[in-house]
Image: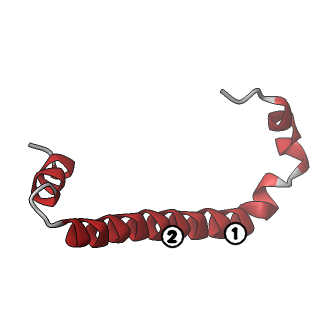
Amino acid sequence: MTIAEQIAQIAATLPEPLAREALDFVRFLQVRERSEWSDWQNAQVSSLAHVWDHAAEEVWNDVPLR
């Protein structure tokens, strides 16, 4: 059984007010995780800007993204 399945199984036994609180906490974790990931991405961009903005790297600007 996955962690998500275990959480769902336990949450299903909670009274409605506690289930709402658990849902709020899970949403908080989602937002926090996205925010931390965004912070890491922004740090990478600023620290590697001098490498990416090099003239020899211009060829990569036209590569199509998936």
| Position of 31 relative to 65 (above/below) | below
Which quadrant: the C terminus?
Answer: top right
Give amino acid for label 1.
Ser
Which quadrant: the N terminus?
Answer: top left
- Give the label, 2 or 1, closer to the camera: 2
User: Can you give x and y, in whole percent of width and height, for residue 9 in the image?
Assistant: 11, 51
Instruction: Give whichever of 11, 40 is nearer the camera.
Output: 11
Instruction: Give whichever of 57, 45 is nearer the camera.
Output: 45
Dividing the picture into quarters, in which one does residue 42 lie?
A: bottom right
User: Can you give x and y, in whole percent of width and height, for residue 65 in the image?
Assistant: 71, 30
Q: Residue furthest front?
A: 16
The residue under the point 9% across, 59% down is: 13
| Position of 25 relative to 4 (above/below) | below
Q: What element carries label 2?
A: helix
Give amino acid for label 2.
Glu
The residue under the point 45% across, 65% down is: 33
Residue assigned mark 2: 36
How far is the residue under mark 2 from the one under mark 1? 17 Å
User: Can you give x and y, in whole percent of width and height, for residue 59 in the image?
Assistant: 85, 34
Q: How many labels does the image show?
A: 2
Instruction: Give whichever of 2, 51 is nearer the camera.
Output: 2
Horizontal side of residue 65 vs 7, given as left or right:
right
Residue assigned mark 1: 47
Q: Which colour scheme is used?
A: secondary structure
The residue under the point 27% across, 68% down is: 22
Q: Is mark 1 on a helix, strand or loop?
A: helix
Answer few, some or many: residues within 10 Å of disc 2's Cα (few below 14, many 20 plus, some between 14 and 19): few
User: Can you give x and y, in whole percent of width and height, for residue 7 in the image?
Assistant: 17, 56
Answer few, some or many: residues within 10 Å of disc 1's Cα (few below 14, many 20 plus, some between 14 and 19): few
The residue under the point 16% across, 59% down is: 11
